[in-house]
C-alpha cells in the first residue's frame, strides 16, 4: 500500500496530524504499537490522571468541606478499585472516540511497531509483519518516564506514573522524587485519599519552570494538605527493601539523608521515545538528549520526514504536540501556518490549579526588560468565597512603556480554563488596559483576571 503521509504514533500530536492531513485530502496512514490509540496522554497520562484527580477531590471535599456546606455524611470510605474502574472507563471512552475519528476521516490504522527500512518504506512488526510505502512521514512517538542513576524502578514499589494510575492500595507514605507537574498531580491524588506524601526535589522550588510566585503559593497550599518538601536534595538511590522503599539523597550540605516509605514515585521528567525506530536507516539525526533534530518547519535533516511533540525540543505538552501536528499537515498542503511557542500555556491540575503563559517574572528580570506587575487574590472574589476556594491569585506582567501583556500567571480554582483568556489576549497583543476594560461576568473566578489587569495598568484594582 502506498500513502501520501504516514504518521508513526497515535498520541495527541499523531492522531491530530492524521485527521488534519485527511481533511486536506492526503491519503493517510497511522501506526500504533499499542492496542489502543491515544498514546501516553489518553492511556496513561493526561486523561486518567485527571479522572483520578477529580475522584479524589470529591472524597476530600466529602471529608473536609461537606459539613461546612450543610451536608452531613457518615462513614465515607475510599473504594480505590471503583475509582480506578471509573478512570479506566473514561480512558476507554476517550480512546474509542479516537478510533471513531480515524474511521470517520478514512485514515488507515496499522497495529504494530513502525520503523524505517528506508526513508519511504516503513516496516510494521507485530501480530502480522508488513511494509508500507509512503511519500512523507511524521514521527510522533512521544516520550516515556525518565529515571536517575541508582534508582531501581521495579514497577511494584518503586514506580512511574503509569503504575501510580493502577494502584491496588492507598500508600501509607508515598515518596515522590521530583517536584514537577506529574509528581505533584499524582501526589495530590493520594494525599487526598489519606497518604503521607514526601517530595524530594533537586532544585530550590517545586514547578521550577513556572513563575516563581506560583511555586511558592502552591507549596504553601500543598503543605496545608499534608505534603512535606525537601529541596536541594540530590537522590543517589531508590530501591525496594521488603515491604518498604528506601531512598537515599544528599542534602545541600552534602550530608546523606535516608527516606523510608511504602511506595516511591519516580517523577523526574520524560525522555523521547525513539527506540528501534530505525532512524539510522533513514539518516535522521538526533541530538545529545535523544531528541530528533528539526528545522523551523519541523522537518528533520531528511527531506520528507518530520517530527513533532515530545520527540523534538520544547515543552512536553499534549496541546503543543497537537499544534505541531496541524502545523506540519497544513505546511504539506502549501499553507502558511504559524506557532507562537511563547503562547503555549502550561497547567498543573492540582487543587488549586496552576497555569501560566508567556514570560515569567524571573525571565523578564534576567533579560533586563522593563515591566510592571499587577496581582489580585482569589480570596477577594465573592465567587471564590462562595465555593470555599480562596487560595491563589492572578498575576499579570505588562511592558512598562507599551502596556502590552508579556505574561499571565495564576493559581486558583479553574485557572486551567481561565488561562485561555490570557492566551487570546496575548495572541492579539492586548494591553493590560484592554483586559481591564472588558466586562467580566459577576460573580466569577474570571473577575480576578480583570482586577489583576487593573492593578497592572495603574495600580487601581477595585476590590482590594
Image (tube, rainbow, N blue to C red):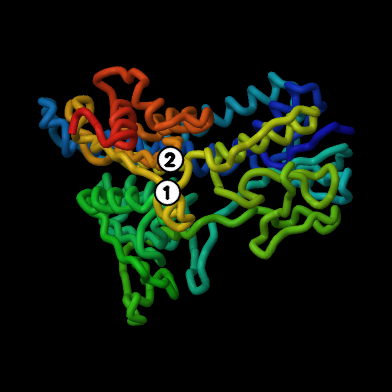
Residue 4 at least partly seen: yes
The residue lying at 76 percent from left, 33 percent from top is: 331
Residue 199 in percent (x, y) is at 34, 60
Residue assigned mark 2: 401
Instruction: Residue lying at the far front in this picture: please name it.
Output: 401
| In this rendering, position of residue 105 left or right of residue 460 | right
| Above or below, 102 relative to 340 | above
Which badge, 1 or 2, comes first in the chain's sequence? 1
Residue 182 at least partly seen: no
Q: Label 2: few (<14), some or many (≥20) within 10 Å?
A: few
Residue 261 found in image quarter: bottom left
| Above or below, 147 relative to 87 | below
Marker disc for residue 351:
none
Question: Foreground: 195 or 215?
Answer: 215
Residue 39 in percent (x, y) is at 60, 41
Residue 157 found in image quarter: bottom left
**Image quadrant containing the C terminus:** top left
| In this rendering, position of residue 140 left or right of residue 1 | left
Q: Measure how far apart labels 1 and 2 are at the Cα level.
A: 8 Å
The answer to whether marks 1 and 2 mark residues whose Cβ atoms lie closer than 8 Å is yes
Question: Foreground: 251 or 78?
Answer: 251
Question: Foreground: 252 or 334?
Answer: 334
| In this rendering, position of residue 334 left or right of residue 200 | right
Residue 417 in percent (x, y) is at 41, 30
SS state under label 1: loop
Residue assigned mark 1: 370
Q: Label 1: few (<14), some or many (≥20) within 10 Å?
A: few
The residue lying at 70 percent from left, 26 percent from top is: 20
**Image quadrant containing the N terminus:** top right
Amino acid at each position: 500500500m502506498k500513502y501520501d503521509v504516514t504518521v508513526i504514533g497515535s498520541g495527541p500530536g499523531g492522531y491530530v496530524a492524521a485527521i488534519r492531513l485527511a481533511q486536506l485530502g492526503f491519503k493517510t496512514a497511522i501506526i500504533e504499537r499499542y492496542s489502543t490509540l491515544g498514546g501516553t496522554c489518553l492511556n496513561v497520562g493526561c486523561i486518567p490522571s485527571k479522572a483520578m484527580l477529580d475522584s479524589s477531590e470529591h472524597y476530600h471535599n466529602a471529608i473536609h468541606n461537606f459539613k461546612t456546606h450543610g451536608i452531613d455524611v457518615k462513614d465515607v470510605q475510599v473504594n480505590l478499585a471503583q475509582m480506578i474502574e471509573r478512570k479506566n472507563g473514561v480512558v476507554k471512552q476517550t480512546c474509542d472516540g479516537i478510533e471513531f475519528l480515524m474511521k470517520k476521516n478514512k485514515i488507515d490504522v496499522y497495529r504494530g511497531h513502525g520503523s524505517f527500512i528506508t526513508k519511504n518504506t516503513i516496516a510494521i512488526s507485530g501480530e502480522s509483519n508488513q511494509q508500507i510505502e509512503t511519500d512523507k512521514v511524521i514521527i510522533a512517538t512521544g516520550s516515556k518516564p525518565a529515571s536517575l542513576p541508582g534508582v531501581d524502578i521495579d514497577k511494584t514499589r518503586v514506580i512511574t506514573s503509569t503504575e501510580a494510575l493502577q494502584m491496588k492500595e492507598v500508600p501509607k507514605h508515598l515518596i515522590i522524587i521530583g517536584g514537577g507537574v506529574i509528581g505533584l498531580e499524582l501526589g495530590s491524588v493520594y494525599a487526598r485519599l489519606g497518604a503521607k506524601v514526601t517530595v524530594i526535589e533537586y532544585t530550590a522550588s517545586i514547578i521550577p519552570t513556572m513563575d516563581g510566585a506560583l511555586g511558592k503559593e502552591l507549596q504553601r497550599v500543598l503543605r496545608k494538605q499534608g505534603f512535606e518538601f525537601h529541596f536541594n536534595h540530590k537522590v543517589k538511590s531508590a530501591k525496594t527493601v521488603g515491604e518498604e522503599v528506601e531512598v537515599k539523597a544528599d542534602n545541600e550540605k552534602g550530608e546523606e539523608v535516608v527516606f523510608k516509605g511504602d511506595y516511591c514515585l519516580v517523577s523526574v521528567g520524560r525522555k523521547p521515545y525513539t527506540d528501534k525506530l530505525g532512524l539510522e536507516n533513514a539518516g535522521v539525526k538526533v541530538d545529545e538528549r535523544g531528541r530528533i533534530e528539526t528545522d523551523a518547519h519541523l522537518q528533520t535533516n531528511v527531506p520528507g520526514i518530520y517530527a513533532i511533540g515530545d520527540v523534538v525540543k520544547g515543552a512536553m505538552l499534549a496541546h503543543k504536540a497537537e499544534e505541531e501536528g496541524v502545523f506540519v499537515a497544513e505546511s504539506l498542503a502549501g499553507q502558511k501556518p504559524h506557532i507562537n511557542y511563547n503562547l503555549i500555556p502550561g497547567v498543573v491540575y492540582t487543587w488549586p490549579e496552576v497555569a501560566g503563559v508567556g514570560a515569567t517574572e524571573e525571565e523578564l528580570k534576567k533579560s533586563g526588560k522593563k515591566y510592571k506587575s499587577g496581582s489580585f487574590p482569589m480570596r477577594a472574589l465573592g465567587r471564590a468565597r462562595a465555593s470555599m476556594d480562596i487560595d491563589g491569585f492572578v498575576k499579570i506582567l505588562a511592558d512598562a512603556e507599551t502596556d502590552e501583556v508579556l505574561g499571565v500567571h495564576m493559581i486558583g480554582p479553574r485557572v486551567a480554563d481561565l488561562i485561555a483568556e490570557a492566551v487570546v489576549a496575548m495572541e492579539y497583543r492586548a494591553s493590560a488596559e484592554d483586559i481591564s476594560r472588558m466586562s467580566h461576568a459577576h460573580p466569577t473566578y474570571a473577575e480576578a483576571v480583570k482586577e489583576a489587569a487593573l492593578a497592572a495598568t495603574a495600580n487601581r484594582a477595585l476590590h482590594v
